[in-house]
Image (cartoon, helix red, strand yellow):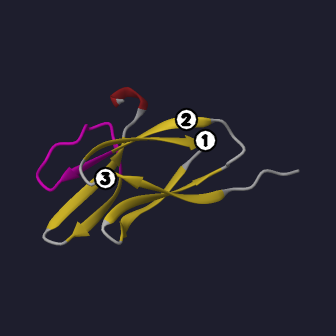
Amino acid sequence: MQMKKEVYKYKVETKGTTVLSVPAPIRMLYVGMQGSSTYVWIECIPEQESTPVVINGVGTGCEAPIEDAYIGTVLNGQFVWHYYRATYESQ
């Protein structure tokens, strides 16, 4: 049987660090609000072994590790949050 990719939604903290356990390999697709919570949508192969994924949410004008990979920006009322996936070196 051939493995297939699927998309899953994971809740993340609006600001600060969230550690997720996601089947690898992964591809970050989208970050956005649903209701009053922030989520990331991740493409993965569910049959694979899980790996930790670290997501950092920072406000406009705040610092993020230079090694982190940008995922997206979310508007939440008067606040704007920017989300990054931590790379191996910055975890």
Q: Is residue 32 magenta?
A: no
Which span of residues is magenta-colored?
56-70
Report the quarter where the C terminus lies.
Answer: top left
- From this view, report whether residue 59 is shown above or below residue 80: above
Categorize mark 3 by other alpha carbons within 10 Å: few (<14), some (14-19), many (20+).
Answer: many
Which secondary structure class fits the magenta region best? Answer: loop
Taking the spot 33% from the left edge, 48% from the top edge, the residue there is: 84
Is the residue under label 1 in contact with that under label 3 (CB below 8 Å)? no
Reading the image, the residue beneath label 1 is 24
Q: Secondary structure at mark 1?
A: loop
- Name the spot of residue 89 as percent of width and height, x first: 37, 27
Residue at mark 3 to residue at mark 1: CA–CA distance: 20 Å
- Name the spot of residue 48 as percent of width and height, x first: 69, 40
Q: Amino acid at mark 2?
A: Thr
Q: Amino acid at mark 1?
A: Ala
Is the residue under label 2 in contact with that under label 1 (CB below 8 Å)? yes
In this view of the protein, which residue sits in the foreground, 82 or 17? 17
Taking the spot 31% from the left edge, 51% from the top edge, the residue there is: 13
Going from the N terminus, do you reach mark 2 or mark 3 first? 2
Q: Amino acid at mark 3?
A: Tyr
In this view of the protein, which residue sits in the foreground, 62 or 40? 40
Reading the image, the residue beneath label 3 is 83
Taking the spot 67% from the left edge, 49% from the top edge, the residue there is: 45
Q: Secondary structure at mark 2?
A: strand
Reading the image, the residue beneath label 2 is 51
